[in-house]
Image (cartoon, rainbow, N blue to C red):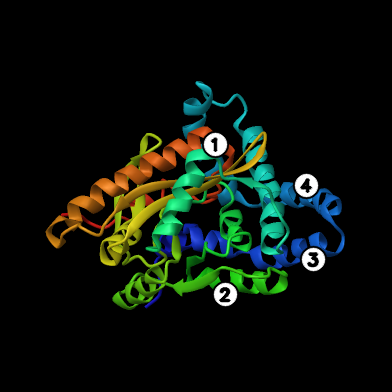
Amino acid sequence: MTPSDDDTQRDARHWSRVQESGTLAGMRLMIWIRRHLGRWPFRLMLVPVILYYYAIRHIPRQASQDYLKRIWPLYAGRAPRCVHWLSLRHFLVFGGMLMDKIDAWSGRTLEARVDGEDRARLDAAIRSGRGGLVLVSHVGNLEICSAMQERRDDFRVVQIMHTRNASKFNELLARSNLRRAPEIIEVSEITPATAMLLAERIQQGRFVMIAADRVPIHDGGRTQTLDFLGAPAAFPEGPFHLATLLRCPLYTVACLRDAEGYRVEFNDFDDTTHVKRAERDAWREQAMRRYVQWLTDQCQRQPLQWFNFFPFWASSTTHTRNDD
């Protein structure tokens, strides 16, 4: 049996396939330049690389423009005047973030503010000793959050990563000189065995980070279609199903760049310790809606820092479960 044209096209547009093409080789080169030639040669090389990528990669370019047309009226109160230029800026911001990611992987100190209430909430979560599940997204620079454990021995991070991409990420970490890399747990889907492993980490007081703004790699993964930036989009149920199994505190973390540098935002989200089995479905539905609202707020504040360069809304028609 051979895949249909629709299946082939759908697979090619999935986020994991979009990211695979050429990513690792390019990252190897950029890491070498940053480590051996320095920051300014890296900057000079980055611009033509981003321009070339923008010119030849149709799917990420179109996805960026689609997203910007949706978010810009919420941010600026009007549609973008020139979406092509704005989209190129989007790619260039991503390039700058890439340099900071490499620095974070390499163990270089990057200033990231954890101010006021965010610091108090983080300190309280650590002192509790309970660990927790941390919902994150592809907004901002998550690697800086993970690298924070370099400066805080009491903040131990575990990252959940899809198997298809984790090997690439681990290879990049191996090429860096990060003194204490985050623990990476490779999964292709959330299973009871996964939940048991993560429960053990959380009982040790660790913080398990999982992105909740991308659909599963496998078509069998359960999703919900929710309104996001004015149109239906598919979001994964897996992180929220996992939360009910782990019965633990939930948090959100973001790391956005502003005029003063990076700022880490750590917030309480919920606690599933007392969610009863009969209440899980209702809790999951309302929690997913709250997460989407949180994601919308993040994008609205820094619209050029959501780095999901794949057809996000189109994916809802091909990856959503049948609720009937």
Q: Judge left or right: residue 40 versus residue 229.
A: right
Question: CB atoms at circles 2 and 4 under 8 Å apart?
Answer: no
x, y percent for residue 98: 68, 53
The numbered mark, 1 or 3, whose residue comes first in the sequence reads 3
* Callout 1: SS: helix
Q: CA distance from mark 2 to mark 3?
A: 19 Å
Residue shown at the point (52%, 61%) measured from the top left: 155
**168 is higher (above) or lower (below) than 79:** below
The numbered mark, 4 or 1, whose residue comes first in the sequence reads 4
The numbered mark, 2 or 3, whose residue comes first in the sequence reads 3
Residue matched to label 4: 47
Q: CA distance from mark 2 to mark 1?
A: 30 Å
Q: Judge left or right: residue 225 versus residue 119.
A: left
Q: Amino acid at mark 2?
A: Ser
* Residue lying farthest to the top in this orientation: 77
Q: Mark 4 Cα within 10 Å, few/some/many (few <14, many 20+)?
A: some
